[in-house]
Amino acid sequence: DGSELRIGFPPDQKSAMNQLDWSNNRSFLEAVLKELTGENWKLKFTIDESLPATAQAAGAADNRGSFKDDTLVQEALEIFEGKIKPVTT
């Protein structure tokens, strides 16, 4: 009937989907959609296996070390006399 809006998420974004699907969040998003479109929408979130992994998830392993160069991280390390330990897998 055109009142349901389905939003698909790649499998690696299941936790993000679940957070949006919380009652309060879903109600808020539905209210925003009504305000923008003038129509009542019911959101339905689904996992879609055909969607590719997000760039964030795909590149996460490559970006692990880049935070070390962040100015804020460097300042925090100095303030708390911290050290960055290598990650062991």
Image (tube, rainbow, N blue to C red):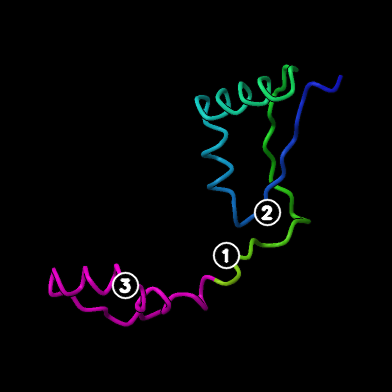
The CA span between labels 2 and 3 is 33 Å
Q: Amino acid at mark 3?
A: Thr
Residue on which the image places disc 3: 71
Q: Mark 1 and mark 2 in contact (Cβ < 8 Å)?
A: yes
Q: Residues within 10 Å of mark 1 (few under 14, many from 20)?
A: few
Looking at marks 1 and 3 on the same chain, the residue that comes earlier in the sequence is marked by 1
In the rendered structure, the answer to whether residue 35 lies left or right of residue 78 reads: right
Q: Secondary structure at mark 1?
A: helix
Q: Secondary structure at mark 2?
A: loop
Q: Mark 3 and mark 2 in contact (Cβ < 8 Å)?
A: no
Residue 37 image offset from top left, x and y in percent:
74, 23
The quarter of the picture where the C terminus appears is: bottom left
In front: 59, or 46?
59
In the rendered structure, the answer to whether residue 19 lies left or right of residue 11 reads: left
Residue 15 image offset from top left, x and y in percent:
53, 47
Residue 35 image offset from top left, x and y in percent:
66, 20
The magenta stretch spans which residues? 60-89
Residue on which the image places disc 2: 10
Q: Amino acid at mark 2?
A: Pro
Residue on which the image places disc 1: 57
Quarter of the image for residue 45 reads top right
Looking at marks 2 and 1 on the same chain, the residue that comes earlier in the sequence is marked by 2
Q: Give above or below for 67 relative to 36.
A: below
Nearest to viewer (mark 1 / mark 3):
3
Q: Amino acid at mark 1?
A: Ala
Q: Give above or below for 8 relative to 50.
A: above
**Residue 88 falls within the magenta-colored stretch:** yes
